[in-house]
Image (cartoon, grey):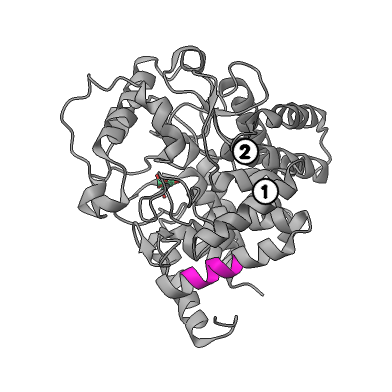
Amino acid sequence: MSSLSSPTAAKRTAEAKQVLGDNDRGTYTVPTARLYPFQWNWDSVFVALGWAELDLDRAWKEITTLFDAQWPSGMVPHIVFWTDQSTYFPGPDVWGTTNQPLSSGISQPPVAATVVRNLQEVEPRLTINLFKGIDRWHQWWHTARDPKNIGLISVVHPWESGRDNLPDWDRPMSTVDSSSIGAYQRRDLDMVDQTMRPHRHEYDRYLALVEFGAEANWDDQVIGATNPFLVADPGVTSILLRAERDLAWLGRSIGLDTAHIERRIERLENGFVQLWNPEAGTYCSLDLRSGRHADAGTSASFLAAYAGVTTHLDQLDHELGLWASACNFLVPSFDPRHRHFEPKRYWRGPVWAMINYMIAIGFAEVGREKWAGRIRQSTRDLITQSGMSESFDPITGGPVGGSNFAWTAALWLSWVNKD
Ligand code: GLC
């Protein structure tokens, strides 16, 4: 175990700065140069935490650039195609969106308000414009992604959850018809080994959902009512609930009325209980088309404390203990005791630094310092051992996916290695 000032840690710090610099495109940062050559929503927001350690102006710029791509509906897209790049598929032609700048047609977990609060606490620079942009985005989640008005936020594509090939999506995705998808060339496999990426049959269905949205002209009402995939996600719901609390704080800090935000907080607090799966003994995603819960927890189950929901804290504490006995590094993205656990396949097992960051914050806030400390230490050991990797194998600690990842670097600078 290295101390905060060890030579290895210093080497990793230099590397983290280098990775941020290499992925910097001036007004936004790409997740990693070839695999993901555009601006990704939640990557960018976490990366702002890293920039805040080096250059506060640049940190705010990262966020405002993202909001420059906000749609009239309030949606903030998951990818913004600021430039033309051939190394990524599917590009803007497949998404068939018309909003400028060109973007994908779905969103990603809304971490912006929480990170903006962090920046604001360092030095208050929040503009009314940015506040309103985030507020409209949050309202969009409640309206467009809770079509049944149940106080839970759903995703209409696995990519919208930010956790692409989670086993949770297997069953709901199995009903998605991909027979119209013709030949296409995946570009991810040119850069990352197949054993670490989603399968072909999953990719076909990802594309079928993109095609469905494009045919619906990305109309939220049509998608909410008829999209073949509609799953309430503990990840997005927890992240939004947390973000709403931080947005209310931001609003108060600049003297605005936040009653409407408090009402949205209450909706989610009331809805949250529906994610509890008594059979699995944890929070699980809920497929709104079939009415069934997933049968196991994911790393997002432990985000309840981060969301400020403390009802089942003892059970979650116990559950995490069982996970910790089944692997060497915390927190795997999926239950390491489950038959669908795969330690190297993307979101079916690997550890992700930014998820650890959020889980640790939540546990620390509810007084479970033991877990907060262990999770941070695990993240530290993983990055020390394997560098700025996309994610990490929870059994061996080895690097998984792409390398030179901006958000891993940003979290090293802003959290893992910070005194
Ligand atoms: C993958 C991840 C997603 C991330 C993106 C860019 O799609 O699942 O969470 O935003 O890559 O890094």
Q: Amino acid at mark 1?
A: Leu
Q: Which label belongs to residue 316?
A: 1
Q: CA distance from mark 1 to mark 2?
A: 9 Å
Q: Amino acid at mark 2?
A: Tyr
- Look at the numbered disc 1 and give the secondary structure of its residue: helix
Q: How many marks?
A: 2
Residue 201, horizontal then vertical, whole percent: 26, 33
Q: Quadrant of the N terminus?
A: bottom right
Crowding near the residue tagged with mark 1, few <14, some 14–19, many ≥20 C-alpha atoms within 10 Å: many
In the image, which residues are magenta?
Answer: 376-382
- Residue at point 77%, 40% (across, down): 311
Q: Which label belongs to residue 283?
A: 2
Residue 149, horizontal then vertical, whole percent: 65, 17
Do tag 1 and tag 2 residues touch (Cβ < 8 Å)? yes
* Residue 80 sits inside the magenta stretch: no
Q: Is residue 83 above or below residue 270?
A: below
